[in-house]
């Protein structure tokens, strides 16, 4: 895919997320890895109205080299790219259900959403830790996210929202969408009886689709 194709894909997927309410206002940011750097959404931009030509371009050292000023969360994305060499894109949202789970005091911080459905396991993986609260834009978040990203494709930022990586931008967006649905199911089911996927079922999914 050319850089131009990547720019248009990012804008199209961002608009789709915004249209479905997974991002509101100017919340959220999206990045992808290029051969010689990164593209990331500009700070204070609405995911519903991005301009492909004005996306922020970063060089391989994450320095701003083109387009509008980048998201204040560049370091959040960098934590994933530097920790997970296979990550080709990162999506950060304030999507309601995942953020609701990120506000619960009584979940397992190592893995707050259990394996309820195959597509959650296939897209997001075996685990997704909660990273303690930091102010948005606080660079102190980077090492905490990097630590969480060592063994997970996604993390939940306490009281803030999900950060999800994927091999491609489409993978990362699909994973963020599955995460939002799994969070919704978890919130619906958590006070009542429900069945989880068994550990062998989870391993079978990861062996075949992981
Ligand atoms: P930016 O507008 O700087 O990308 O920040 C939005 C956001 O979601 C902060 O977490």
Image: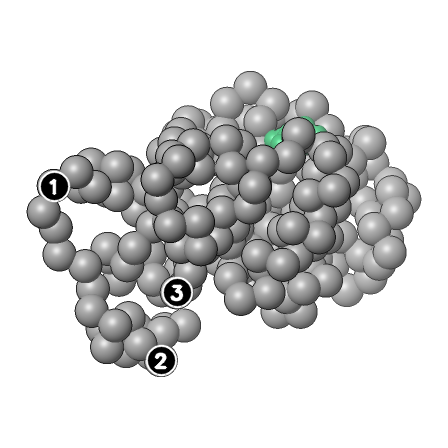
User: What percent of the width, then of the height, locates residue 134?
Assistant: 64, 35
Q: Secondary structure at mark 2?
A: helix
> Which quarter of the picture shows residue 106?
top left
Task: Tell me if residue 139 comes above or below residue 153 in the rendering.
Answer: above
The residues tagged by marks 1 and 3 sit, at their Cα atoms, a distance apart of 23 Å
User: What percent of the width, then of the height, locates residue 139?
Assistant: 76, 40
User: What percent of the width, then of the height, locates residue 39?
Assistant: 73, 47
The residue shown at (28%, 59%) is: 115
Residues at circles 3 and 2 in contact by the CB criterion of under 8 Å: no
The residue shown at (81%, 45%) is: 57
The residues tagged by marks 2 and 1 sit, at their Cα atoms, a distance apart of 30 Å
Q: Secondary structure at mark 1?
A: loop
Q: Which residue is mark 1?
A: 192
Disc 3 packing (10 Å; few <14; some 14–19; many ≥20):
many
Rendered-image quarter of ligand 1: top right
Taking the image as drawn, is residue 193 in sight? yes
User: What percent of the width, then of the height, locates residue 189?
Assistant: 18, 41
Residues at circles 2 and 1 in contact by the CB criterion of under 8 Å: no
Indicate the quadrant containing the N terminus: top left, top right, bottom left or bottom right: bottom right
Instruction: Please give the label number shown on residue 126.
Output: 3
The residue shown at (44%, 37%) is: 102
Residues at circles 1 and 3 in contact by the CB criterion of under 8 Å: no
Task: Tell me if residue 122 comes above or below residue 158 in the rendering.
Answer: below
Q: Which residue is mark 2?
A: 207
Q: Nearer the viewer, mark 2 or mark 1?
A: 1
Q: Secondary structure at mark 3?
A: loop
> Residue extending furthest left?
193
Instruction: Please give the label number shown on residue 9.
Output: none
Q: Earlier in the sequence, mark 3 or mark 2?
A: 3
The residue shown at (53%, 32%) is: 160
């Amino acid at each position: 895919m050319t850089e131009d194709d990547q720019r248009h894909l990012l804008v199209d997927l961002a608009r789709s997320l915004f249209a479905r309410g997974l991002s509101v206002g100017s919340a959220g940011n999206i990045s992808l890895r290029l051969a010689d750097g990164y593209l990331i959404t500009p700070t204070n931009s609405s995911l519903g109205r991005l301009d492909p030509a004005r996306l922020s371009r970063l060089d391989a050292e994450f320095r701003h080299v083109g387009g509008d000023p980048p998201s204040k969360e560049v370091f959040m994305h960098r934590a994933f790219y530097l920790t997970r060499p296979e990550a080709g894109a990162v999506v950060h949202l304030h999507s309601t259900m995942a953020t609701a789970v990120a506000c619960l005091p009584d979940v397992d911080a190592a893995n707050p959403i259990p394996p309820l459905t195959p597509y959650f396991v296939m897209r997001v993986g075996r685990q997704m830790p909660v990273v303690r609260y930091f102010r948005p834009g606080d660079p102190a978040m980077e090492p905490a996210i990097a630590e969480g990203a060592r063994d997970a494709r996604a993390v939940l930022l306490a009281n803030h929202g999900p950060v999800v990586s994927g091999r491609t931008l489409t993978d990362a967006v699909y994973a963020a969408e599955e995460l939002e649905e799994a969070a919704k199911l978890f919130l619906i089911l958590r006070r009542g009886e429900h069945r989880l996927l068994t550990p062998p079922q989870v391993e079978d999914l990861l062996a075949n689709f992981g």
